[in-house]
Image: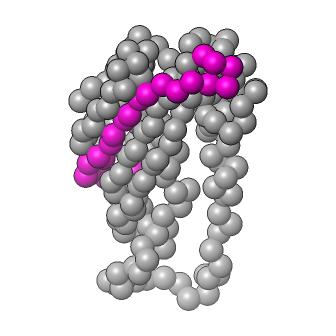
Amino acid sequence: MITEIDSFEFTRRQDSCEDTTPIGDFHRLSSLLAEPSGDLAWRFDGWRERGTDGSDELLVRLRVSGSVSMRCGRCLGTASIPLAVDRRFLLAGSEDEAARLDEADEERDVLVSSRRFQLAELIEDEAILALPPAASHARCEPPLAKSRVDDAPADEPAKPNPFEALRGLKTGRSS
Ligand SMILES: [Zn+2]
């Protein structure tokens, strides 16, 4: 698969690329899953637009879809969880500009453009961000021989707030 691109050229040419990548090729993502099975289909588009100050803005859109195998929180079996990403980013010419744009433009997510833009890393980062904090089957398979003690409390443990977790991750990456 393409792992890096020149995002200056890519946006200038209004280029696109797409591929289907085995999930096992994404090691950080795989380490968070029950099994590294299946594929992620992805598409990356770039273009430029005239910004409000008259200068060219470099823009990209990333779409990822597929399904990942996660451990079901109820039965501990493997649950297939659909994954979908569709995000647009404004590319800044430098780290400094990225920091400035990040402050000035709350609506848009900013990345740093590069002659060696790490596309595979972005796909993996976004797939990880899109994982649900906890997974479960819509309907679990009936347990085989369950030795559950009946006096155990039936209450589910408190789930972490998914938005809190996501905010932490995002801050970590854009800094
Ligand atoms: Zn289950």
Q: Is residue 105 left or right of residue 49?
A: right
Give residue 8's position: percent from left, percent from top: 43, 15
Give the quadrant of the C terminus: top right
Q: Is residue 103 left or right of residue 115?
A: right
72 is higher (above) or lower (below) than 128: below
Q: Nearer the viewer, residue 56 or 30?
A: 56
Give yes or no for residue 50 being in the magenta stretch: yes
Q: Is residue 34 visible?
A: no
156 is higher (above) or lower (below) than 8: below
Residue closest to the far right: 103
134 is higher (above) or lower (below) than 4: below
At horizontal 52% and vertical 27% (from top left) the residue drawn is 49
Q: Which residues are magenta?
A: 32-55
At horizontal 41% and vertical 81% (from top left) the residue drawn is 139
Give residue 163's position: percent from left, percent from top: 67, 52
Q: Quadrant of residue 26?
A: top left
Give residue 43's position: percent from left, percent from top: 33, 40
